Amino acid sequence: MKKSNNAYSLLEVVIATFLMGLAIIPAMNFMTSAIHAGQELETWNQMNLLAVSKLEEQLSIAAADFLEGSDSGTFADPGLEGIRYTATRSTSAANGGIADQLMVLTVTVWDDENGNSAVDSGEPQVSYATKLASMTLYQDGT
């Protein structure tokens, strides 16, 4: 009777499986870190878009009445409860404004990872600021 050597032994199958497992582990770690980096990038993009949107909203409010004020809250409407904002409109010289002439608008958006409603040093944040001048219309009385 002739012996056939066309099949793999159990030991060869176990070794091949082990080597495949060793090759997959770094690939899985790479994929996990890539997914995490993608989520962080998406959060930064959302925060930038939301900050610009909130700054435009504050510009609209300031242009309408040129009144100082502040606002804060979350972006719960688009389903981003963990992302918070603060917005201020000030004519104070300490903030860079000029009373009744130049208003400073500042918006800060952050990912409130610990849920304490405050910007902490480790939390990602985006801040935008601009200035708005009060334009007075002068007319000749004649």
Image: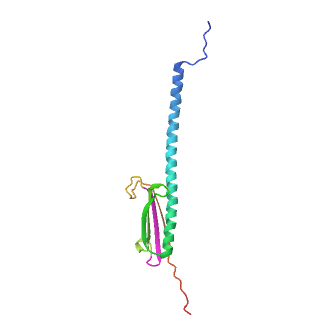
Magenta-span inclusion, residue 108: yes
Say which quadrant the C terminus sits in. bottom right
Depth check: give the residue in front, 41 or 80.
80
Q: Residue at x 51, y 56 (%)?
A: 46
> Above or below — where is 4 with respect to 124?
above
Task: Residue at the far top: name it.
Answer: 1
Q: Residue at x 46, y 64 (%)?
A: 107
Say which quadrant the N terminus sits in. top right
Task: Residue at the far left: name it.
Answer: 116
> Above or below — where is 128 with respect to 37?
below
The secondary structure that dominates the magenta segment is strand
Give coordinates of residue 62: x percent, y percent: 48, 73
Give, as a single range, the part of the protein colored magenta.
98-111
Q: Residue at x 50, y 31 (%)?
A: 22
Magenta-span inclusion, residue 106: yes
Determine the image quadrant of residue 73: bottom left
- Number of marks present in the image shown: 0
Depth check: give the residue in front, 50 or 94.
50
- The colour scheme used here is rainbow
Give coordinates of residue 71: x percent, y percent: 43, 66
Task: Residue at the far front: name it.
Answer: 77
Give coordinates of residue 109: x percent, y percent: 46, 60
Q: Residue at x 42, y 71 (%)?
A: 69
> Above or below — where is 89 with respect to 121?
below
